[in-house]
Amino acid sequence: MNKQIILAKRPVGLPEKDTWKLNEVSIPKIEDGQVLVKQLYVSLDPAMRGWISDRKSYIPPVQIGDVMRAGAVGKVIASKHPEFEEGMHLMGWGGVQQYAVTDGKGWFPVNPDMMKLPTYLSALGMPGMTAYFGLLNIGQPKEGETVLVSGAAGAVGSVVGQIAKIKGCRAVGIAGGPEKCKYIVDELGFDGAIDYKNENLHAAIKRECPDGIDVYFDNVGGEILNTALSLLNMHARIPICGAVSQYNATTPIQGPSNYMALLVFRARMEGFLVMDFAKDFPKAAMEMAGWMIEGKLKSREDIYDGIENFHETFLRLFSGKKLGKLVLKVNEE
Amino acid sequence: MNKQIILAKRPVGLPEKDTWKLNEVSIPKIEDGQVLVKQLYVSLDPAMRGWISDRKSYIPPVQIGDVMRAGAVGKVIASKHPEFEEGMHLMGWGGVQQYAVTDGKGWFPVNPDMMKLPTYLSALGMPGMTAYFGLLNIGQPKEGETVLVSGAAGAVGSVVGQIAKIKGCRAVGIAGGPEKCKYIVDELGFDGAIDYKNENLHAAIKRECPDGIDVYFDNVGGEILNTALSLLNMHARIPICGAVSQYNATTPIQGPSNYMALLVFRARMEGFLVMDFAKDFPKAAMEMAGWMIEGKLKSREDIYDGIENFHETFLRLFSGKKLGKLVLKVNEE
């Protein structure tokens, strides 16, 4: 049988348990051109909150009754597809379920001998690509500049700071709580950390970014974005990656009231979407894997077990009770 | 005697009459290296509101007791300066006063035989340069794209739309009231106009920009910026030139709550300051003058008379009771 997480209703604010329901169906038969993937790890990401709201965005919303959209890695256990053989490992948009049938479009082989599988949902997956292209293509940091990143202990932010270091920048991270702050400095090599839960943001950014901010990579929006705007250097760049502080808002989201700092500092705020860089993923993944092998880039996953625990695990994205990339294991390897 | 407008106190909200006082002093003697300029026309601009607030910005605030900062054009009536002879006309930061003494730094000769003098405060002055560099360097419009501009009947906006037309774009302007809307279409050749005082903004933008917005040149901020954000095309650009709707706010200014549209549309919002392009002013002014001679670019000034009327005239910047560039005549030519 195939256990699936189905969208049951549209949430208001933070999704409650009955937003989804657990469904159990037969494992489908495959037809010519299809593969059956036994999914092993499912990616849980803040963006999922946006996908279940019924509004125009960069991707159509998940419909009620559909399997919840998610990236996943798994193993081919049956194939009538010319390229994907039984026993291969793949990553793709398998959704929150134990088995997925696909025609292979948007799925890519991954090598479990090179990296452990959850890494392909983390530094070598979408979060890593998001960090890579958002920082390098949109943020365009130059050697010696200061890169500030929020959500710095998370899947994207942790990679942003490490790539900033690789590129010769001062990397400063904003994270919630002393454990995460210690982690990004001691384990990941950030130059500085700011604990937004326990520090005055403005004073702490001034302390950790004594030469100002050249790139602020924003994962959170809200008051952190607003404060960073007031401390930019001339011609600073702000890649807009997400606004996790606002995703569960039940009132209109808070716009950055300091946005006129863009004029004062002749700065730029630019949104991007990782999928726009898809054609360059292989090259970026190669470079990232190289950095991992050299020990310059670390990927950490926080893995929880059991598709039944989807809802509780999902909430960790917003409570901050996780360290690194949040992953749900849905089958034994 | 030299009549001057002096900053008397820092206003809260819309400046009241006693924000400034009229001062009368002797016309100063010049020393070696200086010129005495009899000022003829003084430029009144929304940015002046920002200059009298005591906060960090792109330029130090005007101090209480100082002559109010303003651009001006005038005539040299005495000179001990090697380059500027008696009888020459100059433009520069002369302030709101009838006579200015300067060492010539930041002052430039203008030719009254080529264009009438107020034009050098308008399309051939800072507003024109602001439109030129903001649109072309920051907005980067391509032929066939749609350029939307707010404050479209004003000094900057009117030039933005006309340059957009020259570059082969669809030019749509947002202005307040039917008279201004008629003016930008019938007189200036805009393709469409939106009367923000009498129309539903969202519906009107959709009507006038049927192919979406590629460049939104923002002079006003507030709800107009927010609505434009929701109707962008992919990879749209938003040059941030000003936020005239917010300059007199007594509460924290309204940030654009739709800023996450930057991500949805992979769009860019970028601030700029015209002075950053100073080295390219002569080239731009030549090109603009050429367009004026060809009849492709019109400059219109709304000229009021008498330095005593500074305060009432200044308020027209925010009441909208003006058409084109607001200028105060302070001496007879």
Image: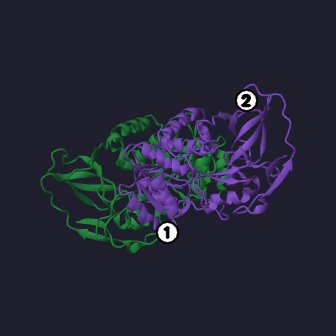
Chain colours: A green, B purple
User: Which x, y percent locates residue A162?
Assistant: 50, 41
Instruction: Residue type at mark 1: give it.
Output: Asn
> Where is the N terminus of chain A found, in terms of image quarters?
bottom left
Tell me the SS state at disc 2: loop
Front residue of B3 and A157: B3
Up-down relation of residue B184 to residue A20 (above or below): above
User: Which x, y percent locates residue B145?
Assistant: 38, 48
- Residue at the image point whose x is 52% and y is 64% from the top: B177
Between tags 1 and 2, which lies in front?
A: 2
Front residue of B270 and A187: B270
Instruction: Residue type at mark 2: give it.
Output: Phe
Which label belongs to residue B198? 1
Which label belongs to residue B145? none
- Residue at the image point whose x is 63% and y is 37% from the top: B112
Q: Which residue is labeled 2 in the image?
A: B84
Q: How many residues crowd mark 1 within 10 Å: few (<14), some (14–19), many (20+)?
A: few
Up-down relation of residue A254 to residue A153 (above or below): below
User: Which x, y percent locates residue B73?
Assistant: 69, 41
Q: Quadrant of residue A200?
A: bottom right
Front residue of B137 and A223: B137
Front residue of B48 and B240: B48
